[in-house]
């Protein structure tokens, strides 16, 4: 699928992680996690770079024929890292897509959906939301590690929260999922090139500090974040246990092919 806009994927990847050190280089079905993410990005957009602060990751990416950019080890977020990488590359892409380096199961359709948001000239940043399905219970809905979001009627984000939003008045919490379509935030982002550079200059905002959600900094500073919906689940790898689950998923997928 060809886009009218020129797009490039930049994949932030750190070696140091409190819960899973070295996870970009962890093996998953005979390939490293970062190679699987890179393959998905290139297959969808045609051009991708890994932005890292670790020579081991850079070398691994070069070994499988990928493109890597060395960035500062002082960045506090993946957004800052990909913004520096974009400057180093000197890209003229209209849209830069931030694909998490620990999301080997990201779907091409999800990347395409985010990019499609830029058909609206008002869109400055795009991200994804996935409806919670009715088989989920309130415990899953209220998990603070699974941020929720609400949008206006045109699909622009109004707010992101670790709390359940909105509150459903007059019903037991066990009835909430069936009473309203709640959206789980999927952390893929796409930015217009100039917007990416601009948001990295912003100071942390009060809402961001309260919820520990970086996207609230952009929202509180007036940036327009368009939300595309997806019915597909992504599986991030944050711990060694997540890697084991991902390996089982991959094996099951290969068996079905």
Image: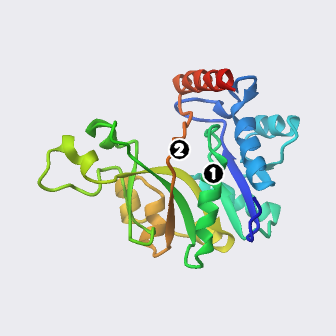
Q: Are marks 2 and 1 in contact (CB under 8 Å)?
A: yes
The residue depicted at 51 percent of the width and 67 percent of the height is 226
83 relative position to 216: left or right: right
How many numbered circles does the render carry?
2
Q: Which residue is tagged 1?
A: 109
Characterize the local packing of mark 1: few (<14), some (14-19) or many (20 or more) Cα atoms within 10 angstroms.
Answer: few
Q: Quadrant of residue 216?
A: bottom left
Task: Give coordinates of residue 191: x percent, y percent.
Answer: 62, 66
Left or right of 143 in this view: 234: right
Is residue 72 at least partly visible in the picture? no
Give whichever of discs 2 and 1 has the lower sequence position: 1
Q: Nearer the viewer, residue 25 or 236?
A: 236
Furthest-bottom residue in this view: 121
Q: Nearer the viewer, residue 158 or 89?
A: 158
Q: Is 24 on the left-hand or right-hand side of 142?
A: right
Name the residue carrying label 2: 232
Residue 143: percent from left, percent from top:
33, 40
In this rendering, the answer to whether 95 lies above or below 160 is below
Q: Quadrant of residue 211?
A: bottom left
Residue 227 screen position, x and y as percent? 49, 62
* Coordinates of residue 231 in the picture (x, y in percent): 49, 47
């Amino acid at each position: 699928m060809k886009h009218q806009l020129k797009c490039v994927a930049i994949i932030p990847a750190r070696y140091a992680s409190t819960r899973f050190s070295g996870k970009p280089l962890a093996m998953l079905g005979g390939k490293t996690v970062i190679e699987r993410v890179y393959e998905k990005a290139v297959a969808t957009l045609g051009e991708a770079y890994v932005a890292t602060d670790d020579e081991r990751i850079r070398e691994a990416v070069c070994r499988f024929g990928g493109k890597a950019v060395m960035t500062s080890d002082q960045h506090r977020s993946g957004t800052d890292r990909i913004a520096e990488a974009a400057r180093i590359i000197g890209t003229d892409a209209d849209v830069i897509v931030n694909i998490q380096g620990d999301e080997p199961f990201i779907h091409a359709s999800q990347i395409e959906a985010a990019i499609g948001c830029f058909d609206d000239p008002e869109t400055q940043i795009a991200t994804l939301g996935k409806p919670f399905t009715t088989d989920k219970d309130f415990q899953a809905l209220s998990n603070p590690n699974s941020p929720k979001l609400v949008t206006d009627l045109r699909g622009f984000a109004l707010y992101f929260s670790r709390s359940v939003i909105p509150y459903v008045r007059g019903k037991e919490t066990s009835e909430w999922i069936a009473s309203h379509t709640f959206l789980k935030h999927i952390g893929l982002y796409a930015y217009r090139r100039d917007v990416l550079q601009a948001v990295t200059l912003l100071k942390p905002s009060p809402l961001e500090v309260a919820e520990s959600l970086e996207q609230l900094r952009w929202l509180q500073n007036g940036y327009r974040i368009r939300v595309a919906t997806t019915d597909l689940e992504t599986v991030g790898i944050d711990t060694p246990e997540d890697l084991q689950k991902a390996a089982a998923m991959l094996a099951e997928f290969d068996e079905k092919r």
